[in-house]
Each structure stands twice: as structure tokens, then as C-alpha cells.
Image: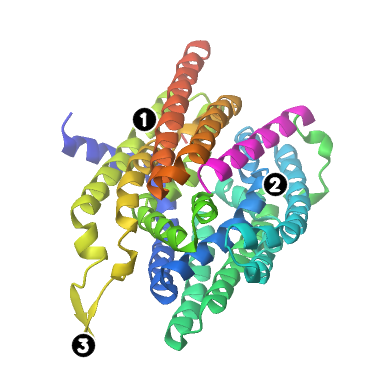
Amino acid sequence: MSLTHTIRTWIKDRLLRRVVRNSAYLFISNAISAILSIVTANLLGVAGFGILGIVIGFCSNVNRLLSFRMGDLVVKYMGESLATDQKDRAAAIVKISMLAETLTSITAYGILVLLAPLGARYIVKDPGATPLIMLYGLSLLASFSTETATGVLQVTNHYRSLALINLLQSLVTAVIIVWASITNAGLLAVLIAYLVGKFIMGLGPTCVSLYWLPRVLGKGWWKGSFSALPPFRELAGFAVSTNISGTINVIARDSEVLWVGYFFSPLEAGYYKTALAIINLVIMPITPFISTTYPEITRSIARGLWSRLRRLLRQVTSIAGGWTILVSIGLLFFAKPVLFSSWLPVIGRDFQVYPIEFLPALPILFVLLIGFGTANTLFWNRPLLLAFGKPGYPLIIAFGAMMAKVLLALWLVPKFGYMMEAGLLSAYFVVSVGMIVWYGRRELRTAEREKPEEALVCA
């Protein structure tokens, strides 16, 4: 089959068009966020950029540790319920999810207040940073129902609403950061800018989902009985497994800047955060595919549309892999001259994306490309097993890989530096993602044998 014929076939594929269109809605705001990261780095310098990353990461990770990732639960169970026209069941799912998420958000902020002095002393290496952590921690309260609301908007295919909210927060944050840059306002002003953006991203989806829910589930959806819920043990097991999975991600993947800050200083953390910010250029266009592909995977599995599911996985893997390879090659050859060198006269002076003091981030970037490239290309690995109702296997694999990474980090990173931390993260991605993909494909083959696809008309 020729490349031209393949592209033409993909263009005509309604399912792929829907996934790509929904992903495009989310891409613009992610692009603005990437630009904001560059402006922020230039404004604060390496050490200041590292402190900002530690404060934001510390607050976000405390929230993730207690989060049950209710968005995943809503996408799976509400999506299945709507696919089989069980609106009472869908309404009950949304209600219980909102209640659980609100309780955990309040609890998370209380724990953050207790831990803030320890984070400031041992990771930021400055007890004076405690108020900054507690201030940014208010974002946890603003996100009291964000995961649930985001799941609702994904299931009901309102990605444009999510994208507009994301765009609004990016623009508001950008205005404040640009003002801070012009006035040299410093770290506090930048932190407030990101906090305001977090409030918009926290409250916005909740408000929009409350507007759409009566139109999808009926005006009295919130009066529905919890008796329509699936068995409590099943829901609790799914929620706990996603919480443990999130905890594993926090320790193994999402705390890199905190680990480097703990082992070394905010300066090294700034280098590492810069490398991660550049990596976002690789994963940025693919990140929206994760949230937009998961509901389509769930629908296909619920209806037993195996050929449609296989086609979708091949298509999104080809798109993600092609983009990842292209951008990775570009970074390998052009990262230094484009990102860290003066290359364009702007208003009478040379312009640099990152000042030369950020150059030590470049070797970290090249090592991270291996792991992030693998995870980026096979981004559907965990959503596939979640849609099959098999959260346990990715949990076991991720836990084993996380324990190995942490133990090796405690042993090797203090001896060999932050480059070893980057190498261990890449190895974590390659091993865990590879094993989860293998198991997911096995589950798909088993499902095809046990429940052969019927002649159904694709929606």
C-alpha cells in the first residue's frame, strides 16, 4: 500500500479525524505554555527557574499522591454507561466521583501545609520558601472537582471547551508573566501568574461540565440514586489502583526536579527543568492524543469493535512515532545553535531562546529523548489496559520499575550526578512501557478470540 493511499485512507477515517480534531483543540494552549516556560526561564535565571520548578512540583505531587485520578474512572464507567444508554448509572458515577475528589483535595491541602516546611528546608534548601509552597498550594483547593469534570467533558466530546479554558488560562498567565518580565517583578509575581492559571484550569472545567451534564443526563441528574452504581468493590479497586499508579508516576517520573533539588541544589534542578521544558516540544503535540484517544478506545472495546480499535492504535502510533523521530532528529542537530546561541538580531541586539548559562541542560535533554520518545510513541499503553478493566498489570510493572529506579538513584545519582538521574528515567520508560504494551496486545488478541467482532456499523 502506497504512502499516498494510506494518507488518503486516514483522512477519510471518521474516528481518526475526531481524535485528531479534538487533539488539535488542546494543542494551541500547550504551545503557549511552552513559550511561557522559555520566557520564565529567561526572567528568573537557572537557579530561580529551579526554585519555581521545585515549588510547583512539590505542590502538584502532594496532590497527585492523594488523587484517585477520577477522570480515568469517569471516562471508563460513564463512557461505558452512555454507550449502553444507562444514564442513571452514568449520573451516579459522576456524583460519587465529585464527592470523592472534593474530600481528597481538602485533605491534600491540609497535608501540604504540614509538609511545606520540610520541602522548603530539604529540597529548596531555603526555609524562607515555605510561604511560597503554601501559597501555590491553594491551587489544590481550586481543583476540587477538576479531574471529574475533565472526564465528563472528554466522554461527552467537549474538547473544544477544555481547549478554550486551557487557552484562557495560558493567555492570562502570559499577560502576568510578560508584565513581570517588563517590570523585573521576580519569583513571587511569576508564581502568582501560574497560580491564577491553575485557578482557571481548576474551576473552569467544573463550571462547564455542570452546564453540559443536565443536557446529557437530564435535569435531575444529581438526584440519581447511588444504587445504580457498579459494585462498590469494583469502583474502589479501580480508583485505588489508579491512585497507586499515580503515586508510582509521582515517585518515578513526575518528581525529577525535586529529586535533583534534593540531591544537589536549585541550580542543578534548573538545568533539569530546562531539559524537561524542551522535551515538551517533543511530547506537546502528542499529549492531547492521550486524553482524546482513551474515550475512543473505551467505546471500541465496549462495543467489541476490534478491527476499528487495531486501526486506531496503528494510526496514532504512526503519527506519534513519526513526529517524535522528526523532532528528535531536529533537536540532535539543531538544539545548540537554535536554543542556546545568538542567531537573530532583535531590536538592535542578538536574541537567544535560552541564555548560555542554561547550556548544561543540553546533555540531559539528549538522554531524556530516549525514554520520552518511547513513551510518546506508545502513549496508549496504559489507557488500553484501563479500558479492558485491567489496571493491575501496568500497576505491577510500573511499581517494579519504580522501585528499581529509586534504589539505583539513591545509590548512583550522588556518585555520578544528575546525568545518571536522566539515564535512569529513560530506562524506566523503555522497560515499563515496553512490557505494558506487550501485555495490552495480548489482552486484545484474547478478547478477539473470546468475543469475535460482529458486523456492526461504526459510529
Q: CA distance from mark 1 to mark 2?
A: 36 Å
- Labels 1 and 2: the sequence-earlier one: 2
Q: Which mark is residue 66?
A: 2
Secondary structure category for the residue under label 1: helix
Up-down relation of residue 190 to residue 182 (above or below) = above
Query: In the rendered image, is residue 208 in sight?
Result: no
Residue in front for this viewpoint, 195 or 222 = 195
Q: Main secondary structure of the magenta part?
A: helix
> What residue lies at 46% left-to-right and 68% top-to-bottom?
47
Q: CA distance from mark 3 to mark 1?
A: 53 Å
Residue under pointer 3:
348
> How far across and down, in percent of the image, does residue 231 sit?
77, 28
Left or right position of 55 against 7: right
> What residue lies at 31% left-to-right and 42% top-to-bottom?
319
Name the residue type under label 1.
Answer: Arg
Is disc 3 in contact with disc 1, using a CB cutoff of under 8 Å?
A: no
Left or right position of 16 against 162: left
**Number of marks in the image?**
3
- Labels 3 and 2: the sequence-earlier one: 2
Colouring scheme, one of rainbow, by chain, secondary structure, one colour: rainbow
Query: In the rendered image, is residue 439 in sight?
Result: yes
> How far across and down, in percent of the image, does residue 418 sit?
41, 49
Magenta region: 231-254
Name the residue type under label 2.
Answer: Leu
Q: Residues within 10 Å of mark 3 (few under 14, many from 20)?
A: few
- Labels 3 and 1: the sequence-earlier one: 1
> How far across and down, in percent of the image, does residue 76 sit?
61, 36
